């Protein structure tokens, strides 16, 4: 775990020196009396909620319908541990996920790497878990990919070409590659290359494979899963850049669930047996086989530093 944090921090050292860090702040509707950088659980019983049915959503890095069956066994386990029915919410966008959390329509979520600071600051998200390999290591890399006939073999060849990003809240799909291209290679979006936005990692990957985009910045975790499912052929893509390791999707809850319910949800994550499940099959390409505990303060420090280097400020509506 510490090794992953060190590698990611080293990759962004030049970014951290570019601009002063902006203090991370929660929206005014939340408190952080214990200083752990996430919203406190309300102490007023009137502000706590104990839903009859729990709603779960996985980050929309790909078509949400792909994951309904993947998560089915885990959600059955979650229901058994909490004693409540659990429904899968096929959220269509990152923004919709954050809004559902903020509005109380979503109780448990897997939030993408770059979106965790937004969900924490603006939606009261309390991340506590992340997928990991059997040895406890975790994370993914950002890769810049192209197709074999593009004529692009190194970063400098992107000059004058189109580079697809996913969405502005994505770490590997936008924030990290834009910042790293500018800091390491002096390549500025809109000046040295033409940015495009595909909306999702699978869109970017398929777009490059079909030569709709010259290149794209994507999470290699998604890329590995798509290759393993034969959605795309590895021969249709070439990687020209691989970043250091970043934390992957963070799993957590809405801040105002009762403390007892939050504890039982966490228990369900850490007691789930992956062996032989659809979840294990889906994430085997990345070697992930269990959930491990994380903290937003420590494990998302590198992501907050990237945001600071880019001058990102969280304005919650």
Image (cartoon, rainbow, N blue to C red):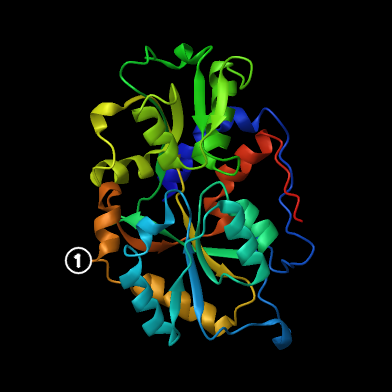
Q: Image point 44% across, 35% down: which residue?
A: 204
Give the percent coordinates (x, y) of residue 54.
Answer: 50, 78
Q: Is residue 280 left or right of residue 16?
A: left
Is residue 39 shown to the viewer in this render? no
Residue extending furthest toward the left = 276
Q: Is any atom of residue 4 visible in this view?
A: yes
Query: Which residue is identified by label 1?
Result: 276
Label 1 sits on a secondary structure element that is loop
Left or right of residue 244, residue 27 in this image: right
Q: Position of residue 289 (x, y in %)?
A: 29, 59
Front-most of 88 and 1? Answer: 88
Q: Is residue 209 above or below residue 245?
A: above
Relative vertical location of residue 278 with respect to residue 169 in this rendering, above or below: below
What residue sits 27% from the left and 71% below the top? Answer: 273
Instruction: Compare residues 296 and 220 and report the one nearer the observer.
Output: 220
Picture quarter with the C terminus = bottom right
Give neighbour class at mark 1: few <14, some 14-19, many 20+ (Cα, 10 Å). Answer: few
Relative image position of residue 115 (x, y in whole percent) = 58, 50
């Amino acid at each position: 775990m510490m090794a992953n944090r060190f590698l990611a921090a080293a990759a962004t050292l030049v970014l951290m020196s570019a601009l002063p860090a902006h203090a991370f702040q929660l929206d005014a509707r939340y408190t952080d009396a214990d200083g752990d950088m996430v919203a406190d659980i309300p102490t007023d019983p009137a502000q706590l909620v104990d839903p009859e049915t729990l709603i779960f959503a996985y980050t929309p890095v790909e078509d949400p319908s792909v994951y309904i069956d993947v998560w089915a066994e885990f959600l059955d386990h979650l229901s058994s541990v909490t004693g409540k029915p659990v429904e899968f919410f096929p959220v269509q966008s990152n923004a919709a996920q954050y809004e559902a959390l903020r509005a109380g329509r979503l109780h448990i979520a897997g939030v993408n790497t770059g979106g965790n600071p937004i969900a924490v600051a603006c939606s009261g998200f309390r991340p506590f878990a992340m997928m990991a390999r059997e040895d406890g290591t975790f994370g993914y890399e950002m890769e810049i990919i192209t197709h074999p006939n593009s004529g692009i073999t190194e970063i400098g060849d992107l000059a004058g070409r189109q580079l697809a990003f996913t969405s502005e809240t994505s770490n590997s799909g936008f924030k990290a590659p834009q910042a790293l291209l500018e800091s390491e290679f002096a390549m500025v979006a809109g000046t040295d290359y033409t940015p495009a936005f595909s909306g999702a990692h699978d869109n970017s990957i398929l777009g490059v494979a079909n030569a709709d985009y010259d290149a794209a910045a994507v999470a290699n975790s998604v890329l590995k899963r798509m290759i393993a499912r034969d959605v795309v052929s590895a021969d249709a893509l070439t990687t020209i850049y691989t970043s250091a390791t970043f934390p992957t999707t963070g799993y957590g809850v809405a801040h105002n669930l009762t403390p007892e319910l939050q504890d039982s949800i966490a228990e369900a994550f850490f007691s789930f047996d992956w062996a032989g499940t659809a979840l294990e099959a889906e994430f085997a390409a990345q070697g992930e086989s269990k959930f491990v505990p994380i903290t937003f303060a420590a494990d998302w420090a590198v992501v907050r530093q990237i945001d600071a280097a880019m001058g990102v400020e969280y304005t919650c509506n």
